Image: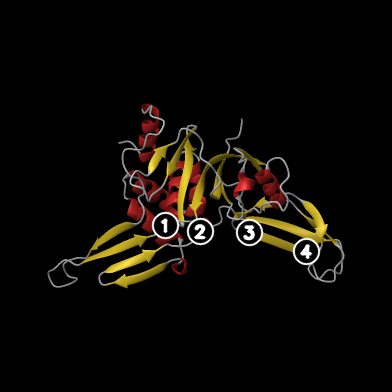
Amino acid sequence: MKTLFEEIKASIKNNYDPDCSFWRPVLPWGGVFTIKAGRKAVSCTPLYVEINLKNTCTIDGFLMLLYVILHENEHFPKELSLHLGREFVDYFLYLMDSSNFTTVKLLWIWDKMEKQQYKSEVHKASLEIDLFGNEHDNFTKNLESLMSTIQESYCSNLRCPTRMQEDPQRTININPPQEIPHGDLIQRAVDELFCSKIELCEQYGCNGLREFTQRVFCHGAPPFVVLNMQQWKPEELAYVPYHLDLSDHKYLLEGATLFNKEEHHYSAAFQIDGYWMHYDGLRNVNLILLNKPPEFLLLSSLVYIRAAENK
């Protein structure tokens, strides 16, 4: 039996239409999960309880990207199991390959999200879970310690009350430059976050210089990273690098999530074997092969995978 990933690859290879679509929906928006209680629940009448999922686009695109990433490198499932749990990774892949898409979303909600991150209400015999909000709150921040980094700094002033500081971060938020210089703005922003530097100490009353060490990953270079691009304007995204130098490692562009402000809706784009596909769970035909790379003007995030090391 072919996996979903193998089916998608086969559809790309065997279809010569540049705007072809995958033959069946993948991770459709929302979802309904029916729970059948035993006969002892209410006399001899089976009791059915539904779980209705709404506004799932805040996790759908990333779940699709996660599935593709897990197939990009034979070592990635084992590596990600260290952060997400072996049972989660195995069950996630099984559910995706068996098209249990609503259960996939519930797995993420119940295993990785906190209850305060989503709204839930009971309507008669139905539980409604609403994921309306921000995809970085609902997905990226729940990747455990995968992208955790730390940077230390030391002030030259011996009397500085906070002479030694640590700046831990669990996600990678890069800020656009205040001025738009020529060149690769995204790489520059990453360098600004990760590279060592010397700045004036911002501690009140201190006139010392603060030296920042290189920011490093707490648990080694992760299989993939998510760059939060929410603060970037379209004119700052004229160039998106396909290769990224990050903490002494090379990363390759795997995909992106896109945000439509008018619809308050997220979608995703990713590449398989060099072919770009667009995923939008809200559409009836929701997985489409693109004849050229997508426009990155409505970016919410960029996703890069770690390049294989040359031996």
Q: CA distance from mark 3 to mark 4?
A: 17 Å
Tag 3 residue: 169
Q: Amino acid at mark 1?
A: Trp
Q: State how far apart marks 3 and 2 are (Cα).
A: 13 Å
Number of dots carrying numbers? 4
Q: Nearer the viewer, mark 4 or mark 2?
A: 2
- Of pointers 3 and 2, the one earlier in the residue sequence: 2
Q: Secondary structure at mark 2?
A: helix
Q: Which residue is mark 4?
A: 164
Task: Tell me the residue that label 1 is attached to.
Answer: 108
Residue type at mark 4: give it. Met
On screen, 262 above or below 11?
Answer: below
Task: Give the residue displayed 41% in from the left and 60% down from the top.
Answer: 109
Question: Percent from the top left, x then y, of residue 90?
Answer: 40, 48
| Residue situated in front as seen by the camera: 130 or 172 | 130
Counting residues from the start of the chain, the first of labels 1 and 4 encountered is 1
Q: Position of residue 238 (x, y in %)?
A: 62, 42
Label 1 vs 3, first from the N-terminus? 1
Name the amino acid type tagged 3. Gln
Q: Amino acid at mark 2?
A: Asn
Q: On the image, numbered disc 2 is attached to which residue?
A: 142
